[in-house]
Amino acid sequence: MMRHYLTWENLIIATLFIGLQVGIWAVYADPQIGTETTPTTSTALVFEPAEPKLETGEKIPLSLHGASGDIVWHSLKGKIEGRGDQVYYLAPAAPGKDTITVTDATGNTATLTIEVSGFLDLQIHNVLFLLFVGFVGGLVSGFIGSGGAFVLTPAMMSMGVPGIVAVASNICHKFPKALVGAMKRAKYGQVDVKLGIIMGISAEIGVLYGAHIQEMIKTRMGDAGSNLYVSVVFVVVLAIVGGYVLRDALKIYRSGNMAEQEEVTKLARWVQSIHIPGTMMYFNSLKARVSVLITIPLGFATGMLAATIAVGGFIGVPSMIYVLGAPSLMASASELVIAFVMGLGGSIKFAWSGFVDIRLAMIILAGSLFGIQLGAIGTTYVKPYMVKLVMGIIMVLVLLSRALMVPIYLSTLGYIDKIDTGIASVVSNISFSMLVGALLTGAIIVLYALWSGWRAHAVEEQAAEVAAMRTSFSLPESTIASQGVFDRMLVASDTSEFSAGALRQAINLAQQDINQLYVMSVLVSNPEYESLVPQLLQNEKQPLLAHLDQVKVQAQQAGVSCEALLRYGTTPYEELVAEAEKSRMSVIVMGRRGKSGVMRTMMGSSTAKVIGFSPVNVLVVPRAAPTISGQPIVVGVDGSRYSERAAAVAKQIAQFLNNAPVVVVSVVYAQHDAARREEANQAVQQTVDSFQAEDIKAEGIVVEGRAAEALVGEATRRNADLIVVGTHGRTGLERVLVGSVSERIIGLASCSVLVVKT
Amino acid sequence: MGDAKTRALTKTFILGGASALLYLILWLLSEHIMAYSQQGKWFFIIPIAIAFVFSAVHGAFTGYFWDVLGVKAKSVKK
């Protein structure tokens, strides 16, 4: 496994990566932040107060005496507010020494050293705000690979955190966040680690160079110049790249082919066709070899942008998609690797200079890790063009936000007429709100995409599950119908107590011979219900599945193999009857509801319907019915063909139960005449004879009374454990109503009743 | 199935607890940590190490957190 990774290519990448980190320490071991050029001092300039001491984040007025003309104030760590010889100084979040440098129109300069003690006082609302922005930023980063940082830095600065500490703390939360996000998305197979590291290394060099340019501009043109540079870069880059990305996303959306494989651009195909010997490297995400001489400038530009506007991904992701030919999802996931490499390097750089406020970084991280996990999960539900859409929209909104600020900076630098401070402040607030709005818009789209994708997926899964639920037992349809009465038993089972007796009886019967059971439960549902409230259906399904598992265990413990089936259906009896017919069952075994009085004489409506519609015999087992062992079997006869069929089945059962004794019962009413009684006697005698011919012990009896009561009474007197009766066919009205006698028998009997279908 | 859910819940609680503990320690020791890390130079290791440790523990916790809440990645059936 290890050998697989020990290639020359990987070794070079690792060496470059480590070398770069070491290089950063070496460069920053002597931080330019700490080195201050000795000013050409002039005693003419005097500060008041002369030796100020203050806490982190504190604001004090500063005056300068003896200056002539315009004065340029510069603070190394803190912030200067205002112009002229009276300004406000805002102490940095970090304690330590800060240096203020002033230069007047005649070139006189002076420096003031300020002692800043204490820590940035974190208020609870600050913490909550950072957690929230961290979460939203994380959500967007998890989805498009970067973003969030452009809001976090100004957000922290608005709390009084000095710019450099805000940037440092932001970047220090960024690399662990990117690490977690990259690992999460690697699980979904979206990350090209090699491409990420290669681009990351060149991006890190880009960051260092970008930061150097920033510092140069700041030294030459001050804060406003630096801000102007940042804004112009923002506007130009975002206008070109953002506009292109958004146009592409909208084009895909309008074409309606959102689900189709993304097309590799002509540019990417050309790039992939360039062969520069000695520089070619294979990348999984591109499924092609590309020269590193092409990835290096792309990574460098990503780093430059990251150093300038804190979001390198705005170049990194589109360049991987459009220039190299990577799929959107892989590009945004690999950007997280770039962000990690860049972020780690940047964090080391800033931490070496002591600018990282780890508390701020970790508070943001607390929120952003929740967000990045969610954003990463979101990518598994969306179509690839969504990455482009979210990125494009954010980029364009950020562009507008920064474009608003350009005139303000131009005016500060004196390139255009001075803009009123009030207006400038309003514009600045609008611009910041737009930044926050851009991030929130991105987050809302991501959440919506996640939600709708998740719902669509849940409905799909549900449909697949429902389709699976419509399956039958493993018996092939062509199976020859069974011969014995209990050869193939279909037990209707639910979680109620009423089906427990049926299961017990079926297991007992299966143990006698075939050792096989088929158990079925039906979950009442309909297609609309399934799609609207899948969760509810799921909740109802769980107990049934658990019940079926329990049934299997119970059967297996009794040495009976059991196949269980859970079906969805609008009407349970239809499902049961259909399955019995399809799988050519020999008998349906089910329970009976009702215990006493009126209830006792009425069967459960499902039971009645199953008997009415079933093509096969139905064994109805009351909850506390005795085990069927043939002690004895009572069969009701009335001379009809239905009762002849019942007698024939009773004979089979008697043989099945090792020649169990049979009592043949016929019932006559008190008002019946002698001829009718004689008919009954003959019917009984014929049946008894047919039993005896098969060596089955049988006796016949004609009792007087109401049919059902008399038959059940006889069965009770003889402690019978099974009553066998015939019933009508399955046509017309009879199909709906079980013969009233059979219905009453089932309702009254405390033993099992087998209803024989003709 | 129930067991797997219980195990996931237990892991979530343990990682959540560990994460909360880390934040508590950071809060209690913040003065010392800040004092050292702001000296810069080789003390850069302090914030970097903290970031790595927090990302491992809190990252694992947040992963389980969404999982336990039922927010999972789309399952691809093969």
Image: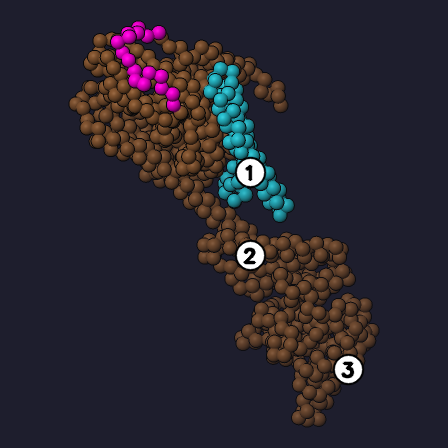
Using the image, tell me which numbered label, if any, was put on residue B16: 1
Name the one closer to the observer, A188 or A352: A352
Mark 2 vs mark 1, foreground winner is 1
Disc 1 to disc 3, how far (Cα)?
Answer: 77 Å
Residue holding disc 3: A700
Task: Indicate whether residue A47 is drawn in magenta.
Answer: yes
- Locate residue B31, reporting x and y percent: 50, 26
**Tag in front: 1 or 3:** 1
The magenta stretch spans which residues?
A38-54
Question: In the rendered image, which residue does mark 2 sit on?
Answer: A540
Quick one: SS at disc 3? strand
Quadrant hosting residue A74:
top left
A501 horizontally vs A531: left or right: right
Image height check: is A495 above or below A713?
above
Q: Residue at x 66, y 72 (%)?
A: A755
Residue type, label 2: Glu
Vertical order, A319 against A589 (above or below): above
* Relative depth, front residue between A307 and A467: A307
Q: Residue at x 59, y 21 (%)?
A: A4
Q: Residue A161 falls in which quadrant of the image?
A: top left
Give the x, y percent position of residue A342: 45, 21
In the displayed structure, does residue A42 sit left or right of residue A562?
left
Foreground residue among A453 and A394: A394
Please determine whether, in this image, residue A415 is positioned above or below residue B7.
above
Give the amino acid type for the residue marked by disc 1 in the picture.
Answer: Gly
Label 1 secondary element: helix
